[in-house]
Image (tube, helix red, strand yellow):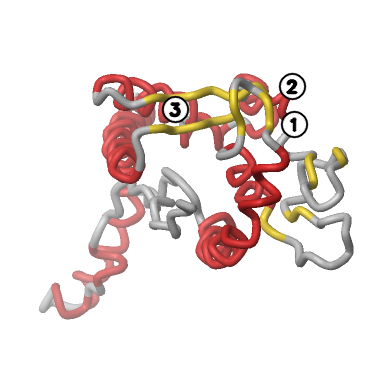
Amino acid sequence: KKLAAKKQDTQRRLKSERKRSHGELQNAIVRQSDTVKSEKLSYKAFQKMFGKSINVRAPGFFESGLNRKMNSLGGRFISIKTYTTKLSQYDHTTDTYVKKPLSQRIHIFGDGVTAPVQRDLYSAFLARHCDSDVLNASQAVEAWPSAEPLLRQAALSFSQLATNNGYAKVHVKHSRSVRRRRKSSVKGNPNGAQGCGSRSGAVATPRIVRAAKSAPIYDP
């Protein structure tokens, strides 16, 4: 019962902190633009592939919340069909589509001249030039010279976030073991607090390592 209650409390605190963090990032996006474009993805499929990670971060809830917020403010939330646009496969330097494994997070251009760029950032750049589920390739080619340095600048922080912790990762120390260490420290040192360091004397609560760092805004 105690374990179940502790798990329930952890889930409750995680849900509350995730809601706050989602709202923070949604507000940051809304402040930048009145139009948001997002690829229409199957988060159920993601859940089968990544399991607990998707349950913790809840990207589906984030997207639906952002959609509601954009609509309430008179903005637009546009879902782009991946089947017709194939943004993760397209290469504007060769005007071709090349399938990549999901594990490959870098887009390597086929012209042999343009330096590789982070895959998700490149897809976001292409999404900006999608109209009615159709990619405007000529527009993307024209906009690339001004967008390229911004994408590379954004990649520096993006890669760091992706390898660090991302969204809503729970770090909970067992309170029972902490209490035991605290008691042993107090017994060994009658003065109490001086012998009990901050690491063992405090119980960490669930916290979200936010991925909401501002990236350069591309606006040609």
As displayed, is residue 135 above or below residue 72?
A: below
Give the distance between the C-alpha atoms of the residues marked 2 and 1, in whole angstroms.
6 Å
Of marks 3 and 1, the one in the foreground? 1
Q: Amino acid at mark 3?
A: Glu
Name the spot of residue 210 as percent of width and height, x first. 39, 51
Give the distance between the C-alpha atoms of the residues marked 3 and 1, in whole angstroms.
20 Å
- Whichever of callouts 3 and 2 sits on the residue coming sooner in the sequence is 3
What element does badge 1 sit on? loop
Q: Amino acid at mark 2?
A: Tyr
The answer to which image quadrant residue 51 occupies is: top right
- Residue situated in front as seen by the camera: 145 or 187: 145
Name the spot of residue 82 as percent of width and height, x first. 69, 26
As displayed, is residue 43 above or below residue 189?
A: above
What element does badge 3 sit on? helix
Residue at numbered disc 3? 63
Give the distance between the C-alpha atoms of the residues marked 3 and 2, in whole angstroms.
19 Å
Q: Residue furthest left?
A: 191
Residue at numbered disc 1? 86
Q: Are marks 2 and 1 in contact (CB under 8 Å)?
A: yes
Q: Are marks 3 and 2 in contact (CB under 8 Å)?
A: no
Say left or right for 42 vs 210.
right
- Determine crowd level at label 2: few under 14, some 14-19, many 20+ residues with C-alpha closer than 10 A: few
Q: Are marks 3 and 1 in contact (CB under 8 Å)?
A: no
Residue at numbered disc 2? 83
- Residue situated in front as seen by the camera: 155 or 31: 31
**Residue found at x 66% / y 51%:** 142
